[in-house]
Amino acid sequence: MKQFLIAIVLISTLISCKNSGENKRDTADSETMENNTADEVETNYVPIDSDEALIAASLMAAPAESRDGCKVIGYNMAGEFVTLREGDNEFIVLADNPQQSGFNAACYHKSLEPFMARGRELRAEGKTGPEIFDIREEEAKSGKLDMGMQGATLHIYYGESDQYNPETHEVEGAHYRYVVYLPFATAESTGLPEKPKGSNHPWIMDPGTHKAHIMISPLPKE
């Protein structure tokens, strides 16, 4: 009789452990399903349809720690080229043009403004890309055109979409490219190749000209 009672106790213990294990697995499976569901929630991207949204998204071109003090210029939603926001630091943000498809905003060191403004002026006059290049080349060589500080940078934030996340201000699918201006630098003076050797590899573009610059294209985020 004693052995029979012991056997009953052992069987009851095993059944209890089995049920406990199954409950834990059920709980874990439920948590996994909830996590997967959360991961599948899509970001709520919306059109950039106001000057405020345009400014916020375009400021993503600037370094995060400098965005609060950047001056922002460019076309507003009405199609006018204006100062969208005043600033007090070393950067100027050129906002995306809402009249063009996709998204393309730039942030550059303020010492580059004469060079950038001259390009906008010549483009407004109807000059072509090659004509603008030749005019600025001549003016830079003569000293008429200020090319800014050696090593001044341009940050570009661009993509094919014009949808943005109003919470983070990120534009759908956009990524970065960086330019370091070194007027009249060459492959020999910098040690950089004239073509990229691979993804994310720096190289020098327009070597030997006023527009010589180092190109750096970070790999897109996963």
Image: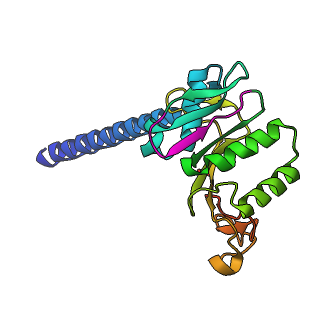
Write down the quadrant of residue 53 in the picture: top right
Write down the quadrant of residue 106 in the picture: top right
Give coordinates of residue 142: x percent, y percent: 73, 62
- Residue depicted at x 75% and y 72%: 194
Q: Is residue 87 left or right of residue 211?
A: left
> Hey, which residue is sitting farthest left in the picture?
2
Please tell me whether residue 37 is drawn above or below residue 138 in the rendered image.
Answer: above
The question of residue 137 being in magenta is answered with: no
Please tell me whether residue 218 is drawn above or below residue 125 in the rendered image.
Answer: below
Give coordinates of residue 200: x percent, y percent: 64, 64
Decide which of 143, 35 is in the foreground and name it: 143
Q: Is residue 143 left or right of residue 42?
A: right
- Residue depicted at x 13% and y 44%: 1
Give coordinates of residue 79: x percent, y percent: 73, 22
Decide which of 97, 167 is in the foreground and name it: 97
Q: Is residue 85 left or right of residue 12?
A: right
Write down the quadrant of residue 57 in the picture: top right
Q: Which residues are magenta?
A: 87-98
Please tell me whether residue 61 is drawn above or below residue 87 in the rendered image.
Answer: below
* Colour mode of the rendering: rainbow
Please tell me whether residue 170 is drawn above or below residue 206 in the rendered image.
Answer: above
Please identify the dominant SS of the magenta region.
loop
Decide which of 194, 4 is in the foreground and name it: 194
User: Do we see residue 43 in this rendering?
Assistant: no
